[in-house]
Amino acid sequence: MPFPLGLSRANKIILITGVILLIYGFLCRTIPINFFWDSRTIGWILLFVALLLYWINLRKRRRQQGKKTVWVAIGIIFLYLGLSILPVVIIIIRNSDAYNAATEYLKTDTKIRTEVGNVNGFGLIPEGAVQVTSHNGVKSGNATLAIIVEGNKRYMDVIIDLVKLPGEPWTVTNLRAKR
């Protein structure tokens, strides 16, 4: 039986892999399995890639049939831009002073160490936002980051809020478990 929607073989593989990783990402938090918690984020990325490839194929079929393709093309552009910007955002967040301050704090926080044990590392793909403003060369800002903390006892999703006052280093203002 052919796969519905006229998907190519590569697109089927990407779609199925994305769904499997997404399901595993939710299950590993529920069961809990302390391995590859980044699978949920990677699963979402693969699902968006599969959608992008499907829309490209749909546009091609609609053009061959002489149908309008404007809305499909707009969707392709938005998905492509989002998927192109994502790695840049991840690199910027991981190299930010706010991320470094957050990870240093998480390594030494007694509540985190009680929950996860010794912190062995952090997830590959941090989520969140870092906002920095500069006034006369003096920086200030806010950040909210969702980070996977990998401990020797277990893994944990945390959300950490930071603030940078003018002339001060980044300071953690709130730490909570992500639900």
Image (cartoon, grey):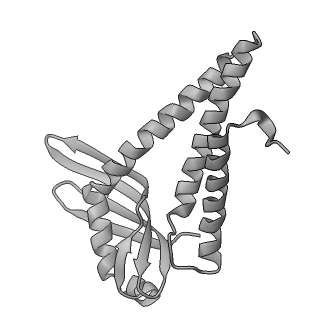
Q: Which of 19 and 61 is in front in this view?
A: 61
Reply above or below: 24 against 16: below
Q: Nearer the viewer, residue 170 or 87?
A: 87
Q: In which quarter of the image is the N terminus?
A: top right
* 125 relative position to 37: left or right: left
Reply above or below: 89 against 31: above
| Residue 49 screen position, x and y as percent | 57, 41
Which quadrant of the structure image shows residue 145? bottom left
- The answer to whether residue 159 of the structure is visible from this angle is yes
Reply above or below: 12 against 29: above
| Residue 8 screen position, x and y as percent | 68, 37
* 68 relative position to 36: left or right: right
At horizontal 51% and vertical 79% (from top left) the residue drawn is 34
| Residue 52 screen position, x and y as percent | 60, 35
Q: Residue furthest top?
A: 66
At horizontal 38% and vertical 50% (from top left) the residue drawn is 90
At horizontal 46% and vertical 88% (from top left) the residue drawn is 153
- The answer to whether residue 164 of the structure is visible from this angle is no
At horizontal 41% and vertical 51% (from top left) the residue drawn is 129
- Label tally: 0
| Residue 87 screen position, x and y as percent | 40, 45
Q: Residue furthest right?
A: 1
Reply above or below: 69 against 150: above
Q: Quadrant of the C terminus?
A: bottom right
